[in-house]
Amino acid sequence: MLLLGIDVGTSSVKVSVVDANTQQCIASAQYPETETGITSLQPGWAEQSPEMWWLHVQEAILKAHALKKYDPKEIGAIGIAYQMHGLVLIDKEQKILRDSIIWSDSRAVEIGNEAFHAIGEEKCLSRLLNSPGNFTASKLAWVKTNEPAVYEKIHQVLLPGDFIAMKFSGHTTTTISALSEGIFWDFANNELSKDVFGYYGFDTSIVPEIKKVFTTHGAVKEDVATTLSLKTGIPVTYKSGDQPNNALSLNVLQPGEIAATAGTSGVIYSVSDTLAYDRQSRVNTFAHVNHTEENKRLGILLCINGTGIMNSWIKNTTGGHLSYPQMNEAAKQVNPGSDGLFVLPFGNGAERMLGNKTVHAHLHNIDLNKHTASHLFRASQEGIAFSFRYGLDIMRANGLTPSVIRAGRANLFLSDVFADAFVNTTHVPVELYQCDGSVGAAIGAGIGAGVYAGEREAFANMKRLQLIEPSNAKRYDELYLEWKNILDQQLHT
């Protein structure tokens, strides 16, 4: 049996086909090859078309088929990972009412802050485990206030993965994990939050049927199966936000285990069995993929909006003629500290760990007679690593004591400069694995379809590729303190 995993990212869609018996990836494809754009109609806004996601999903699947490495008719289950927090609105005919307001959009910050105070800070934190902040519920409230004609037509509110599953099957479902990432879920009472729905004036009918993460969320329709050369009736058996899915991909499922990723955004994700929260809501707590009321598994998530997108911006701004591997090699030719050049990478909207402030990206101490593009490459990656240290210190203050962090050998972790800066700045060793979100979604589909007896069997063949340990922590501590001083000045400007 083959499993199809789909990862709907901000930049592109990636799909992988995995052999259920060996857990090995047979074929992968990405669409489009270039990074997908984000519509920003006003400063701080970020939108994408859900129908564009669906088009890209189909193109990616057909591209994988074209590799001729498997028989599409042998695919027996589908799993979906998706960019978190996106607001997708559909009418009764399952038509999209507007573009999705995605995770990096900052327009609802003040709406969420007002809700936090009005509902009560202690009540929000103890029940929602978060402030309503700039999450999906607050974005929906923005639509209600600013686009009443759109709001009146809403039949259901979906997360991006719910939407893609709907396009496959014609059915709509959601999960507690998805609802928690939208700040719709009351953990204390294990129900839709009466506080959030009451304060914002939402009707609970807008929420689709709530199901477990690992279960059948619908079956592939005949017309979709024909278009994609799949068997009609294949079940969609797994849906998860990209960060819980990344943790699943790394077999981070039990309390104390920690995952990290450094793609467009950067994340540290720790699993806990207690209803924990940060009093300032700088890090956030959501239901993990294996969370139940009886067996609590919470994902404590630090998200930094400005990470890989900073690296991408530097690449494009310097002409884009170098590939990422070439940039990484050029960065290695510069000493740690980039000869005094520092980068604050926070140019991708409001940062939760900075109190939802929009700090913007900054380049500090540029010397026109000294600094080159190679310095920019290194300083950018070091600044991103310093951002992780800043956020990890917040998590440490909330009781996290990491001994090792698991990550996929992908994105920024492909750079020796970044990986070295990360472990030396955080003082935490990193284990690298051949981890991929679409492969993780395929394994999740296998768990949901009952192919595996449990998570342990699903990851029986997982092997560590590399262990990176701190070797220059003292120097990076000095650099981090200089960087943090620059950040503190911006935060108090």
Image (spheres, rainbow, N blue to C red):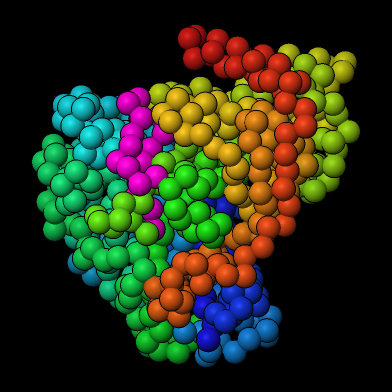
Q: Is residue 282 magenta?
A: yes
Q: Position of residue 449 (x, y in %)?
A: 40, 78
Q: How many marks?
A: 0
> Which quadrant of the structure image shows residue 272?
top left
> Which residue is found at the position 47% from the left and 45% from the top?
256
Asked if residue 482 is positioned above or below residue 113 in the image, the reply reads above
> Which quadrant of the structure image shows residue 141?
top left
Asked if residue 124 is positioned above or below residue 354 in the image, the reply reads below
Q: Secondary structure of the magenta portion, mostly?
A: loop
Q: Position of residue 225 (x, y in %)?
A: 44, 85
Asked if residue 445 is positioned above or below residue 472 in the image, the reply reads below
Q: Is residue 426 left or right of residue 223?
A: right
Q: Position of residue 75 (x, y in %)?
A: 51, 84
> Which quadrant of the structure image shows residue 356?
top left
Nearest to the observer: residue 455 or residue 330:
455
> Which residue is found at the position 39% from the left and 64% from the top?
239
Q: Position of residue 172 (x, y in %)?
A: 27, 68
Q: Which residues are magenta?
A: 272-289
Q: Is residue 167 visible?
A: no
> Which residue is found at the position 51% from the left and 71% from the top?
458
